[in-house]
Image (cartoon, rainbow, N blue to C red):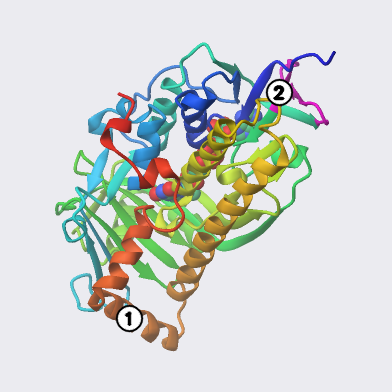
């Protein structure tokens, strides 16, 4: 008789996506008997304490619903969820208040806001907090090896522990060890761009608006925070990012003021800075027998539209939905990790992610470009979209994660779905 694996599912990576996925599995009635291992190299042991966080994410309406369903949303303190009501996008060859600027507003869409700016460490902490349950075993260690066999997956951790599972979910980020272990190739195209992030104080109020000015080397975005400050993401060439990082606080603040065209007046730096080289990446396969990828382990997208973690949370929601549907149609725990279920997930999410990656890639090419013809095209393009309410609405619904093929926990969301 075959012995039972230690776990039904082992999630490698307890970042924002992996931890939320664990919460979704836990709260899905048809999957509530699964035994889950969550492997995370750097498991936080207490909630974030710092007032200044460099890594933040713009969280869409779809992600708010997924995080609510996973039980994580109530674990994010209200003060840490900075709602924004408007978004303003303009080209460096025009002004933020000109006809060539694009403006989106929550009120025009009948939405309470366009989303929230939330620190990544709060998102991760809240998602982990929602997984405290005897059905989830948290293992603090680094994944070392995975061996897939017909019956189960054998996992070796760097601290020497070995576990087995029916299914391994790789949620261990862009440099995914789990993806490498099972031999899935990823197509990677580095953007010759680096994102510099910092928190700044501005002379004028941010007006709960996300501001983004496109320059030839890349955009600078000001994301509004509840405490009145802004988190900035300045995308530029690697050399320029290195020069900016080497500046003292006063010189860097004045460079940011100039790059923003003083849209919020003078800027003061209130944090250190960090830089991230940017890349486009997509795994060639999202699954193998007993193995599946979610989040940045499957795809990396340019941050200009703030979509990376939002796409990852959609992956998690889609996978849980398909597993739940399979279970309800009579598929046993033993066969849940078979390729027929996983391939449906791959077809769904690869199509949606390819579309999003392509769209954002095209926007980056259109905007990060000094050619006069392209400059003319983007100014007239922005002005045209501004005048076309239907197109504007479609763009915004996609940014909110409410357009395209979305999981039912997003499309049929009912406030009573929220696990309080
Ligand atoms: C400058 C910048 C701005 C961004 N802004 C936004 C935004 O506004 N909105 C948005 O949606 N996205 C944004 N993104 C993208 C977003 O940060 C990523 O998409 C997101 O972090 C992916 O989450 P993840 O959980 O898949 O991976 P990660 O966040 O990389 O988490 C992976 C986890 O796995 C763990 N891990 C890794 N290797 C191992 C191992 N071998 N063993 C065990 N554990 C392991 C790590 O410790 C980590 O906790 C931005 C990205 C950048 C660079």
Q: Could you tell me which secondary element the residue under label 2 belongs to?
A: strand
Q: Is residue 402 above or below residue 177?
A: below
> In the rendered image, which residue does mark 1 sit on?
379
Local packing at callout 1 (Cα closer than 10 Å; few below 14, some 14-19, many 20+) is many
Magenta includes 164? yes
Magenta includes 270? no
Seen at 52% across and 57% down, the residue is 352
Is 359 left or right of 230, judged from the image as shown?
right
Q: Quadrant of residue 92?
A: bottom left
- Of label 2 and label 1, which has the lower sequence position? 2
Q: Is residue 80 above or below residue 139?
A: below
Is residue 272 at all visible to an observer of this figure?
no
Is 343 left or right of 302, judged from the image as shown?
right
> In the rendered image, which residue does mark 2 sit on?
165
Nearer mark to the viewer, of 2 and 1: 2
Quadrant of the drawing holding the C terminus: top left
Q: Quadrant of residue 382?
A: bottom left
Residue found at the far bottom of this picture = 373
Give the number of the disc on residue 388.
none
Q: What residue range appears in magenta?
A: 148-166
Residue 107, image x, y percentages: 16, 56
Measure the C-alpha gap from mark 2 to mark 1. 53 Å
Quick one: 164 or 340, which is closer to the camera? 340
Quick one: 31 or 79, which is closer to the camera? 31
Q: Is residue 214 above or below residue 341?
A: below
Seen at 23% across and 31% down, the residue is 78
Is 201 left or right of 234, judged from the image as shown?
left
């Amino acid at each position: 008789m075959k012995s039972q694996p230690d776990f039904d599912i082992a999630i490698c990576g307890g970042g924002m996506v992996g931890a939320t996925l664990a919460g979704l599995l836990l709260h899905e009635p048809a999957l509530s008997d699964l035994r889950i291992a969550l492997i995370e190299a750097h498991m936080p042991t207490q909630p974030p304490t710092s007032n200044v966080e460099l890594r933040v994410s713009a969280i869409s309406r779809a992600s708010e619903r997924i995080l609510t369903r996973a039980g994580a949303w109530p674990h994010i303190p209200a003060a840490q969820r900075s709602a924004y009501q408007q978004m303003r996008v303009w080209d460096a060859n025009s002004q933020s208040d000109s006809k060539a600027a694009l403006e989106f507003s929550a009120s025009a869409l009948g939405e309470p806001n366009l989303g929230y700016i939330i620190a990544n460490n709060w998102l991760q902490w809240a998602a982990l907090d929602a997984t405290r349950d005897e059905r989830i075993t948290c293992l603090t260690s680094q994944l070392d090896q995975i061996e897939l066999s017909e019956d189960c997956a054998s996992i070796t951790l760097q601290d020497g522990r070995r576990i087995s599972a029916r299914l391994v979910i790789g949620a261990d980020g862009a440099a995914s060890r789990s993806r490498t272990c099972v031999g899935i190739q990823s197509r990677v195209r580095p953007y010759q761009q680096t994102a510099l992030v910092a928190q700044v104080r501005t002379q004028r109020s941010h007006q709960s608006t996300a501001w983004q000015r496109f320059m030839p080397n890349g955009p600078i975005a000001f994301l509004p925070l509840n405490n009145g400050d802004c988190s900035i993401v300045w995308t530029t060439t690697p050399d320029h990012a290195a020069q900016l990082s080497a500046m003292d606080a006063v010189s860097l603040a004045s460079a940011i003021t100039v790059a923003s065209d003083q849209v919020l007046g003078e800027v003061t730096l209130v944090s250190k800075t960090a830089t991230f080289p940017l890349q486009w990446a997509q795994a060639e396969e999202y699954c193998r027998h007993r193995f599946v990828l979610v989040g940045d382990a499957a795809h990396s997208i340019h941050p200009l539209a703030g979509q990376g973690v939002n796409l990852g949370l959609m992956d998690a929601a889609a996978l849980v939905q398909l597993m739940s549907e399979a279970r309800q149609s009579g598929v046993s725990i033993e066969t849940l990790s078979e390729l027929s279920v996983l391939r449906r997930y791959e077809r769904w999410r690869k199509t949606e992610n390819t579309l999003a990656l392509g769209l954002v890639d095209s926007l980056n090419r259109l905007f990060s470009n000094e050619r006069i013809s392209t400059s003319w095209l983007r100014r007239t393009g922005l002005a045209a979209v501004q005048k076309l309410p239907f197109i504007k609405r479609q763009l915004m619904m996609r940014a909110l994660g409410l357009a395209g093929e979305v999981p039912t926990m997003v499309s049929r969301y009912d406030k009573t779905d929220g696990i309080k």
